[in-house]
Image: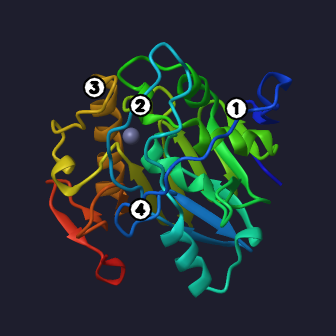
Amino acid sequence: MVRSHGPRGDRAPPAGGQPHEVRRRPRLRRGAEGGLGAVQAGGRTEPGRDGLRGDDRQAPGQGHPLRDGHRREPDAALTALKRLGIRPDEVDVVLSTHLHWDHAGGFTRLSPGGQVEVTFPKARHYVQRREWDFALDSDPRSRAAYLADDFVPVADAGLVEFVDGDAEILPGVELRLTGGHTPGNQVVIFRSGELAAAMTGDLIGTTPHLRRAWNSGGDLDVVRALQEKGRLLDEAAAHRWLLVLGHESEQAAGYVSPEGEWTPEPGLRA
Ligand SMILES: [Zn+2]
């Protein structure tokens, strides 16, 4: 049973009914982090962390970036799942905060033969509709950050679930549309009784970004990003939410006080 606060649940159709051309791109690994926000399998949810940023080349005037740029492989996420005894085809939900290549790059992977394939072939991938639309037709500044091979094959496989706004996609698993960083940026919130954990993505990328006025240089709507970050920090401090920061390599998970002090969760150090 899936509940939601807004219209959602329809699957993405194949792109215009046309075969989508997917070309091979060089394999590139960046650090040990997986690009996925979280994956869920068999009732267990395993948060990943959003990864590193990077530059890329783009096709001028084209909605789809060239395929000769960077891509992120989901090696770290797959290794972590394997450690838990979970196969990729056992994962049933995949979540990420937005579709930038360093956050959605694990949606697909290169097969041994060099073909782009969906990493979790039975998982529903929840994406804000406005993020999807923007990713396919973004502005010149953002275009290099979206790689069609990361997410279009997922839609071609019928595995995208569009979300419009806030939604509870499973009991205790909430998506909160924040915008700011990108038009369809979302925060993922997990709740269990009085406990909650939020995956901040690029809304709070690293511990310096816990300062309310320090935003990401990649934010498209700075004011909204700061407003949503302030709201999240207020809630996290008031209710002792566990925050998992999208780009923090040393102290990725922890708690923030009303005064802005960061206390890492010792059981979840990188
Ligand atoms: Zn981003």
Task: Verify CB contact (< 8 Å) between mark 2 and mark 4.
Answer: no
Q: Which residue is mark 2?
A: 144
x and y, in percent, of residue 18 in the image: 82, 25
Identify the image quadrant of residue 242: bottom left
Choose mark 2 or mark 1, whichever is in front.
Answer: 2
Q: Which residue is mark 4?
A: 29
Color theme of the render: rainbow
Q: Amino acid at mark 4?
A: Arg
> Can the viewer see residue 182 in this picture?
no
Q: Which residue is mark 1?
A: 6
Q: Quadrant of the N terminus?
A: bottom right
Q: Amino acid at mark 3?
A: Val
Query: Quick one: label 2 or label 1, which is nearer the N terminus?
Result: 1
Choose mark 1 or mark 4, whichever is in front.
Answer: 4
Task: Verify CB contact (< 8 Å) between mark 2 and mark 1.
Answer: no
- Crowding near pointer 4: few (<14 within 10 Å), some, many (20+)? some
Q: Which residue is mark 3?
A: 222
Residue drawn 80% across the image and 22% down it: 16
Secondary structure of the residue carrying numbered label 2:
helix
Query: Quick one: label 4 or label 3, which is nearer the N terminus?
Result: 4
Identify the image quadrant of residue 240: bottom left
Q: CA distance from mark 4 to mark 3?
A: 30 Å
- The residue closer to the viewer here, 124 or 223, is 124
Choose mark 4 or mark 3, whichever is in front.
Answer: 4
Quadrant containing ligand 1? top left
